Amino acid sequence: MSNYYLRQNTHLGKDSIQKLKESTVIVVGLGGLGSGVAQILARMGVGSLILIDGDSVQEHNLSRQQLYTIKDIDKPKVLAAKKHLSQINPEINIKTFQKMASENFFEKIEKITCVVDCTDRHESRRIIDSACLKRNIPWVHGAAIREEGLVCVFGGKYSLKSYEDIYKNKTIDEFCEGVVAPITNLISSLQASLVIKIILQKPIPEGILRINLDDWSFDNLNISSRV
């Protein structure tokens, strides 16, 4: 696979490949966002991917969860994802956990470069937020519903320190029964881009990027965290 990263090296430089290989990224949730994020990170050569999801592939997932096929229906998402990702890039290390994320889980992993939130529940995001705050680990938040989405980075050295500080009054989850592939693909691509920036220590845009493909609006919300 000597030419695998040829075009990538032209832009990022060969040194970037080593940084990517030495990184460990946790992807929580392997649905419309997570399947896209994991695929991009695998193609770019992130050395270790830890995939967390307790669900199995369903037929209605296939319209927007780009990593899976009809043959994956009823299979655990983590196992289906690992199979496809290993075929995309056999050089990366993939670990899977077929369960919901817990704060204790994050404490058991010694080396974490960053965490990617691809869930659709505030409870899961609060767990990620608390665990990452304790260890000063940056995490990339993404959300999508209908034709709308948002993405940002919390924690670490970045301007938004805490998810809980912004969303502490949010108690009801808005389940993504209505969502289309263009917005999940776009948000997952932006999440993956932010992960790469974190790994390569490139500047991260401040605030929250909110996108609405219905009216083609892209708004950067400069929200100052109180933490």
Image: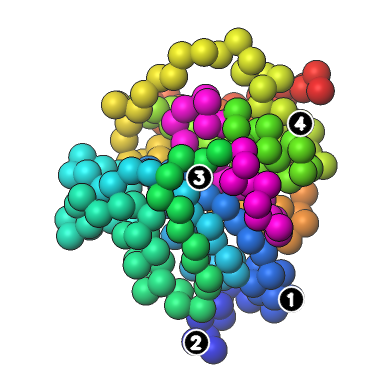
Badge 1 is on which residue?
Answer: 15
In the rendered structure, which disc, 3 or 4, sits on the residue that comes first in sequence?
Answer: 3
Dot 1: few (<14), some (14–19), or many (≥20) neighbours within 10 Å?
few
Question: What amino acid is found at the position of numbered circle 2 in the picture?
Answer: Met
Query: What's the distance in space between the residues labelled 2 and 4, CA to CA?
Result: 39 Å
Q: Which mark is residue 170?
A: none
Which residue type does callout 4 highlight? Answer: Lys
Query: Pointer 3: what residue?
Result: 28
Of labels 4 and 1, the one closer to you: 4
Mark positioned earlier in the residue sequence (1 or 2): 2
Residue at left offset 50%, top offset 45%? 28
In the foreground, 202 or 94: 94
Query: What residue span does the magenta drawing correspond to?
Result: 103-125
Look at mark 2 in the image and give the residue it sits on: 1
177 up-or-down from 27: above or below: above
Query: What is the C-alpha distance between the residues marked 1 and 2?
Result: 17 Å
Q: Residue 180 in the image: state x and y as whole percent.
A: 31, 35
Q: Is residue 158 left or right of residue 14?
A: right
Q: Are marks 1 and 3 in contact (CB under 8 Å)?
A: no
Task: Identify the secondary structure beneath mark 3.
Answer: strand
Nearer the viewer's eye, disc 2 or disc 3?
A: 3
The residue indicated by pointer 4 is 161
